[in-house]
Image (cartoon, grey):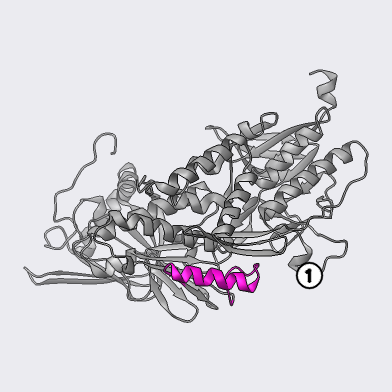
Amino acid sequence: MNKKMADKKKVIVIGGGFGGVFAAKSLEKLGRGVVDVELINNNNYFVFQPLLPEVASSNLNSSDAVVPLRQLLSRVQIRQARVMGIDFERKIVIVIQGARMTPVELPYDELVIALGTGVDLARIPGMSDHALTMKDLTDAHMLRTHVIGCLETADVTTDTLVKDQLLTFVVVGAGFSGVETAAETNELISRALRYYHNIKPEEIRMYLIEFAPRILPTFPADLAEYATKNLRANGVEVLTGVGTKSATSTGVELTNDRVINASTIVATIGNGPHPLVDALGLDMKWGRIKTDRFMQVPGHDHVWALGDAALIPLNDYPKDDPADYATQTAQFAVREGYQLAANIVAKLKGEPLKPFAYTSKGSLASLGMSKAVADVYGVKMHGIFAWLLWRGFYLSFLPGLVAKFRVGLNWMINAVMPPNIVQLRMPAPATRYIHFWKGDKVFEPGMLIDGFYTVIKGRFKLTIDNPETGEHFEKEFGPGEHFGERVLLISHLRTGLVEALEDGLLLFTAQKDFRRFARAFPPLEKYFRSYIDETFGGPDKAFAPGNVKDEKEDEHGS
């Protein structure tokens, strides 16, 4: 290493969102010859979050909302890795990278924390297990795939209750993300219905739920009222002044005790601190790292924070009022990135730092169907002109000329082409939690055996009747007990009914994974076979789990 390289200061930026990307880009430009910049991110791409609802609605391809970090930051060292911890005393960032998952220690001279926020839905029972979110590209793709799957099944089912549930969609939270997600999803469904001949437009139910008295609380009241009327005119049922009490796989319960049966729940609420940020032991408020006006973290001379993860004061004496701090929006994060980079370079050169100051240029929100609301420089607009402004603003804001061209071109093509309703399925998790309300059916006779259930909370009742022999069997299950062991022996249809006797929680394990684990661990398989004999009276019973010949897996366990 030559002397020039050795004299450079190492700056590590953690996080590849707006704040991290623009901080790294500005650092490389302003500090060329002074700093060596490295950006660490779990993905090798930057996600343009404002476009995620359009990805979910098929107006854009998944690749249109992302830009490879190595293309966007060609002069910055990019490291795709997961940050496990930070040692502030030793000035070390600890990451896990590669297939071997070996911890690697990375020393720094200056550290920039730009990790954004996480999702915390734990305060609403069942929401974290049953709601889709809209934080990253995977979320948008999952929502699109899920909605198309609901339409596919609803078009062919003969069960009216199942159809009603499949065609009911609930979006919880009516801020920017919630309103745009509801509007874009509703537009996708409306445009796709021409291909689903057994679904009528009036059978679709789209709900937008907001605890506050009105939607878009940061917008002027008259624009929020316009947005509400527009959404309702397009079939979205807007419910304000009511929150969500609980959620299951079959719907949501509201704080006014109303139950909405739905197969689709999207949560755009519950922003919380990023898990790593929460574990760092830094001084925090409202789930964000406290900084001074220069974006330095007090008590840590070489640590900086910006973006959604940081609480940056906009004046010297901020009150306990969010208005006195930088808002969690892309336009603020970009400006913070510029200023933070300038401050780091100034610090290294021994020059004075400049406090962060920025006034929002305004707000825009898409309502779908070529409509939007906008409040820009105090000028309020709505309708198609606001929608064109919304698209133009975000197109100009999108980093990279190639990304701008690709998004603009796709917008023009999709304006005249039918929506893409190809369903690219994603593998379901091997295990998952499922919440049930009292009276809900877990499964019933005639359903395909698909997995094994362990009771975590609540009580459940299994009932099996054989009309040919008159045999009847009943058993209740509580926490720590299980049912569905039949998946170990056969692939067949259910013969029993399981209902929730009270609100409860089950851990579901998919059939293939349960079989693999049990057969790889002989004592476990032996336990379940003995349990079946003892509980059901042996395989000679007509309703017993062993009354059908075992289906063996092949030598590869497939």
Quarter of the figure with residue 542: bottom left
Quarter of the figure with residue 375: bottom right
Tell me the amino acid under the disc marked 1.
Answer: Asp
Does the magenta portion include 216? yes
User: Would you say 230 lies left or right of 260 here?
Assistant: right
Q: Is residue 279 visible?
A: no
Seen at 93% across and 38% down, the residue is 350
Mark 1: few/some/many CA within 10 Å (<14, 14-19, 20+) = few
Q: Is residue 124 visible?
A: yes
Give the residue pinned by disc 1. 320
User: Would you say 74 lies left or right of 403 here?
Assistant: right
Q: In x, y percent, where is residue 467?
A: 9, 70
Which sits in the foreground, 231 or 474?
Answer: 231
Q: Which quadrant would the N terminus be assigned to in this image? A: top right
Seen at 46% across and 59% down, the residue is 369
Q: In x, y percent, where is residue 123?
A: 55, 68
Seen at 68% across and 41% down, the residue is 21
Does the magenta portion include 305? no
Q: In x, y percent, where is residue 416?
A: 41, 47
Which region is colored magenta?
213-237
Numbered marks: total: 1
